[in-house]
Structures are given as structure tokens and as C-alpha cells.
Image (spheres, coloured by chain):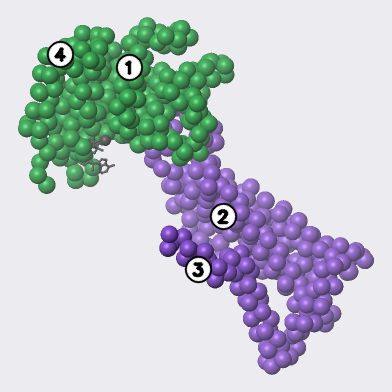
Chain colours: A green, B purple
Amino acid sequence: MAFLQISSVHKRFGSYAALENVNLSVQQGEVIALIGHSGCGKSTLLSMIAGLSQPTQGEILLEGRPLKGPGPERGVVFQNYSLLPWLSVYQNVKVAVASVHRERTDDEKARITEKFLQIVGLWAHRHKKPGEISGGMKQRTALARALATNPKLLLLDEPFGALDALTRANLQDELLRVWDSTLEDSFLRAIWGGERKTILLVTHDIEEAIYLCDRIAVMSNGPAASIGKVVEVPLPRPRDRRQMLESRAYVEIKEELLHLLTVVYAKKAA
Amino acid sequence: MERIVRKPASRGLAVPKPLLTGLNALTGFFVLLLAWHVLSHTVAPKVPEPSKTLGIFWQMFINPFYDNGPNDKGIGLQLWLSLERVFVGFGLGALIAVPLGILIGASEGLRAMLNPVIQMLRPVSPLAWFPVGLAAFQASEQAAIFVIAICSLWPTLINTALGVGSIPQDYRNVARVYAFSPWTYLTCVVLPHSLLYVLTGFRLGMGIAWMVIVAAEMLAGGTGVGFFVWDSYNSGQLEYVMASILFIGLVGWALDSALGWLVRRFSHG
Ligand SMILES: Nc1ncnc2c1ncn2[C@@H]1O[C@H](COP(=O)(O)OP(=O)(O)O)[C@@H](O)[C@H]1O
Ligand SMILES: [Mg+2]
């Protein structure tokens, strides 16, 4: 049984058919990317998996059970960050940690918050308000918030889009470490357990998708978009970025994705 | 080079901004006094002229807190008694308006149910509420406070509901995904988002409360600036009526400025 099963999902907004007959199954511990042209319905699909909106038709099962609204076992990094503007970076993460890890002591909650702010490199900026930091820092705050709640399934909507190349590469590696539960910090490892997270990531960066993922689901264009081809990424882990970029397999996957995006599911002329 | 030379020259001609604002304000007051003077010497000869009124104003101003028994108190004391009533009445009104506004803002059903009631009660004059207060509390002091409360709570109620009703979907999604408790949702989302709306409601409500207090005290009698105005009129001391109007206006202005400052403070952070 798949960890996450999306079966014949349709989504309409009034008379506009955004998604039609979307099918996807995701295994526990998998990292999977959702890639497609802007406006094809990636965020719409993600928000249905998060339980924030319901499919017009079809169903989504998580561990065999139909979704009943949102829940902290699914952490979300929203495309527009959705930080609370009156709370500091620290408080934004802390309030989520305190809500989700209700049974932990105050000291543990503070430690979890601190660790993840350090992981995303924001500890020095923890007292700033979202209005006082860059888009990249907001994304990192939102990422820290999602990771710190220890979800089984991480839903990331273009989480690195606003970052410079160097920070992006760093955070991709940190994300893989969290995913793989190979965190250096023993306190976090104990909390996180040995099980790999499942990650569903929306991106339009092909290199990022290949570097991070086991599979890449390519979406066709809207209206009535759905998941077209799912491309496997058979590169061994742990991956070395430089080696990957030079490997034949990488080049072939990249060619295939480019072909799918620019020819097969090319943006229709308006 | 040329620019650098020209700039100070053009600045030298301009009047500094605070000074200009002050001059403009003085001109405004001068126009007011002039119009008042002309009117008091033509169409309304019974109304005291500005120079007499200002003399009385000054006398009242330099000895504001004397107390010679129930019928002879300094203007400062009278204003203070009025302010006390305003704060109590306004505070009670806010205690009702804020929680009720939150509920109305959060529930579309409640909004549909209560909006017509609010729209109907909101325009009712304080003079009409006073007998209701008297009947309910059998005491004019409580009736006055009741009138202040019921007349000043509407802007707070409406603004709070507006604020709570306009919480962006994004913030609500965050609260849902991360399983915020109702208390966390209230303190970390609802209240911070609505704060500015509530404070703006306070500011409008305080303006109403300060207007209503004079009417309420005229009816209630005893103490306060409203009573003082009415008492001065009855004893034929119209200069005191006019001077009191200046005091009432200045205090109202100060109240509004204080709340305006509060609103501005929170709209930046
Ligand atoms: N709440 C909504 N109401 C109406 N149309 C919507 C709504 N949300 C998304 N859409 C439409 O659905 C399509 C997919 O949007 P979205 O999922 O945001 O695309 P993507 O994330 O792939 O860029 C777009 O055409 C968008 O205009
Ligand atoms: Mg999107």
C-alpha cells in the first residue's frame, strides 16, 4: 500500500477545470518532485494533499485513510511563506513547535526551535520580524517551521525559489539530512527517529529536482492539467553534486525533462 | 556644482515646516475668533463675545481644581468627573464590544443575525437611551454610564468584527496545518491582526463617548462638565458656557490625539 495515494482527483474553480484525473502514488520515505509550468495547478494539488482544500472529485489517501482536513503530520512550506508578520522569526517557528509538540517540555520546545533555526542559518536573525528580512530568509523561516514540527510528510511549494545559488545548495543538503535522519545533533536524531521522511516538493528547477528526488512527476498544462509522465532518478545516494552534474544519467534525465516540458507539455499559446 | 550652490538658496526662502503648521493653525483660530466676534455683535447679541469669554476661560484655567461644595467646583474637577464617567462607560462598552465583535467577525451566521440589529440600534440618540437607563438602574449616575456605554460601543463592535472577518486565508491555513489551539489562534492570529481595527474603533467610540457625556450629564445633573454647562446657562452666566465649550473641545482633541497616536504606533510595528 502506498504511503500517499492520489486517485482520480479533479479540481474545479467554478467553471474552470484546473486539475483533471490526477493519479499518483508516493512511497513512504520517498522524495518526489512535482514539476510543471506556472499556473498548471501544482499549488492546488499540494493544498489538497495538505487538506486545506478538497478535491471536487476523487480521493486522497494517507497511509490508507482518507484525509480529514489538515494535520501536523503534514508540514507545509507555503509558496508565499505565510509567516505571521507580527511575530519574530523565532516566535513564528516556536508557536508551531509549541502547538504540535504539545507534550514536550518548554525546554525541549525551545531547543527544537533553536536547532532548526540554526540549521537554516537564521539563529542570528531570530529577533527580526518577517517584514525586516529578505524573501530568502522568509523561505528559510518557513522551512524551519515545517521541519521543526517533525511531519511524516513534508509538502514544499517552491521552497528554494527566492534563494541565491549558494544558500540553495546548502539548504538542499540540510533538507536531505533531515530527510535521511542523518542529523548531526543527537537530540534531534532521538526526536526524529530513524525513519525517513516523505517529501513532496514543487519546483521548476530541473537540477534541484534531479539532485533531491527519487522520482519527478511532470504535470501537463492547464486547464484540465494532470500528472503526465513520472521520471525515475536512479542516481545512487548519497549524491555528490559535482559528480552528478557530470554523470551521463543526469544529462539524460535532464534532456528528458526538458523535452517533456518544452515539447510534450509545452505552454499553450494563449 | 551648480546644484549644490542652488539648493541652500532655495531652502533659505522656505519657512520651516513646524513653524508653517503653527502659523496656519493660528490663522485658523484667528478666523474663528473673528467670525465669533462679528456674529456676537450682529445676529446673536446675547452670545458672549470672544474677548469676555477668553477672560473667563483664563480665570477658570488658572484655578481648575477648587471645590466649594456640590454647586461650585473648578473646571478641572468637572472635566475630571466627566472623564471618569467616560472611561467607565466606554470601558464597559468595550468589554462587551470586543468579544462580541470577535464572535461576529468569526461567524457568518452570527453576522447575518446581528447586523440588522446593530444597524437599527446604532443611530439611536443618547437622549432616547437615558430614560431606558433610568428605568433599568433607578439612578441617574448609572443611567449616564449606561448611555455612554451603549452609544460608544458600536464603532468598536463593527471594527472588531471587520478586523476578525478579514483575517487572510494564509494565516488561517498556518493555524490549521500546525494545529493551533483556540487560545493560540486567538492570541497569535486573531488579536494581532485585529488590533489596529479595534484601536480605530476605540478612537471613533471615544469621540462619541465624549460627545455623549455632555448630554448625559445635562440630564443626570449633579456634577461633570455637562452639568456645569447647563447650570451656567440656567444661572445666566453665558461666558461660562462658551468657555466650557472651549475646554470640552480641547479635552476631546487631546483624547482623540492620544488614541490617534496609539493607532499610529501599532500601524508601524
Ligand atoms: N482559489 C482559486 N480560485 C480560482 N482559481 C484558482 C484558485 N486557485 C488556483 N486557481 C487557478 O488554478 C490554476 C492553477 O493554479 P496554481 O495551483 O496556483 O498553479 P501553480 O502552483 O502550478 O503555478 C491557475 O489557473 C489559477 O488561476
Ligand atoms: Mg504555485
* Same chain, labels 3 and 4: no
Q: Mark 2 and mark 1: span between their CA atoms? A: 50 Å
Residue A204 lies, in percent from the top left, at 22, 30
Residue occupied by mark 4:
A247
Look at 82% across and 68% down and name the residue there: B61
Residue B135 appearing in the image: no
Q: Label 1 lies in what chain? A: A
Decide: marks 2, 1 in contact (CB < 8 A)?
A: no
Residue occupied by mark 2:
B201
- Tag 1 or tag 4, which sits nearer the N-term? 1
* Same chain, labels 3 and 1: no
Identify the secondary structure beneath mark 3. helix
Q: Amino acid at mark 2?
A: Gly
Identify the secondary structure beneath mark 1. helix
Q: Mark 3 and mark 2: span between their CA atoms? A: 44 Å
Q: Label 2 lies in what chain? A: B
Residue occupied by mark 1:
A173
Q: Please indicate whether residue A156 sits to the left or right of residue A118 in the image.
A: left
Residue A119 lies, in percent from the top left, at 42, 19
Q: Mark 3 and mark 4: span between their CA atoms? A: 68 Å
Q: Is residue B31 above or below residue A185?
A: below
Q: Is residue A125 above or below residue B161?
A: above
Q: Amino acid at mark 3?
A: Ser
Residue occupied by mark 3:
B10
Residue B79 appearing in the image: yes
Please tell me whether mark 3 or mark 2 is closer to you in this view.
Answer: 3
Q: Please indicate whether residue B207 sits to the left or right of residue A74 in the image.
A: right
Identify the secondary structure beneath mark 2. helix
Rendered-image quarter of ligand 1: top left
Residue A128 lies, in percent from the top left, at 50, 34
